Image: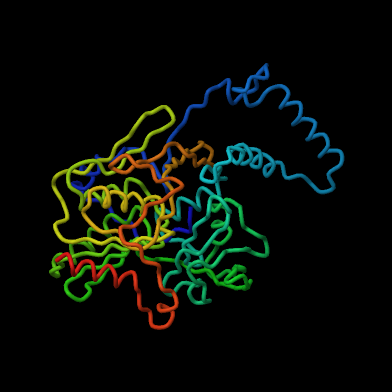
Amino acid sequence: MEEKINSYNQEEPEEKKKKNSLVSGKKILFAVAAVGIAFVAGRYTAGSGNSDDVIITREVEQKVETIQQVIDKLYLEKEDIGAVREGVYKGMVEALGDPYSVYFTKEEYDAFQESYTGEYCGIGASLLQNADTGLITIVKTFKGSPAQEVGMKTDDILYKVEGKEVTGEDLSEVVSRVKGKEGTTVNITIVRNNEEMDLQLIRKTISVPTVEYEMLDNNIGYIIISEFDEITTSQWTEAYEALKQQGMTSLVVDLRNNPGGGLSVVAEILDTILPEGMIVYHEDKNGQREEFKSDAEHKIEIPLAVLVNGNSASASEIFAGAVKDYEIGTLIGTQTFGKGIVQQMIDLGDGSAMKVTISKYYTPKGVCIHGTGIEPDIQVEFDAEAYEKDESDNQLQKAIEVLKENK
């Protein structure tokens, strides 16, 4: 999860809707989907034995009653029954030990849906959480955003929100606290070079495209995808077609600091550049597989370079993995994040929801990159000092060199 940035939604033309049949009707995600679920009665209701397959046994019920009696008798303050119930649900999911499986209250779920489908009020920063350390880092700040205005930078560590440490907390909940009504203030503490910095930001409506593009010298097209949201497919199409009309003879796709997004979205985009064949597939614990394939209608015919780094995650890695497996382009930069698992959002019917890890995904050649990431074809460490000095981008320059050689 990350603080999403979206600008607008567009209705897909009928032709595109038909083409989207290459992906499932339900939204499998790294972002959002809502489907019904039927629970197995014996597993989630009170049981009579101590079987490992039964969650709520009589022993558990008795312990809950004992804890409640202690609270009723001794707890100093007034108990918030609603908060306690939500805590039970959250605890059940957190006990899975999976940082990507999360329970959402109604308010949290509403905020999550908003972040995926439209504008939101926040600070204008994309966030990423390390599954091992729990650290939350700033992946990117957006032009004109409150985050950029106060000087937040990529790789800053988000340490506190309103004085409360957030390391190890669910990223969705942290994002919901960072967001708020336009014009309100949020106090954030970041860590940079082992030093704490207290920042006060005024929230505002964030409306930033997920795709930016320009034509570089020598007719080299340059497309930056900041994340894969619902609106990204149409923005990609607009950028790709515009550059072709301008005479593009080679292309750089920049996925650096792209934390991911929707699986169906990245599959649609890859279908416009891949030859006919497998894009990606994911497989659940029962061995059931869902495949995403490209057709023979489109295939990129010009030299391609893709920029990646350690913050290129999930859907970005699907893009990079497909390009690498089909050998249609050159990956340049540093090793990617290594998130090769898929989450699905389950609407629980009362406004709340649960995001749960359901499967692992595999590149066209059957490689699962979870925990390892993707090694670029050409390793180039980013020269941050040079960029700070004059905004020279050595990774992008390397991509340009490679494309010139391949012409």
Report whether residue 210 is seen: no
The quarter in which the C terminus is drawn is bottom left
In the figure, is residue 353 to the left or right of 369? right
Image-quadrant location for residue 185: bottom right
Q: Residue at x 17, y 43 (%)?
A: 276
In the figure, is residue 277 to the left or right of 184? left
**In front of the other: 163 or 279:** 279
**Colouring rule applied to residues:** rainbow
127 to 132, vertically: above or below: below
Q: Residue furthest top?
A: 48
Q: Residue at x 59, y 22 (%)?
A: 53
Rendering coords of residue 193 (x, y %)? 58, 72
Image-quadrant location for residue 287: top left
**In front of the other: 104 or 327:** 327
Rendering coords of residue 227 (x, y %)? 38, 58
Report whether residue 265 is seen: yes
Q: Residue at x 54, y 38 (%)?
A: 350
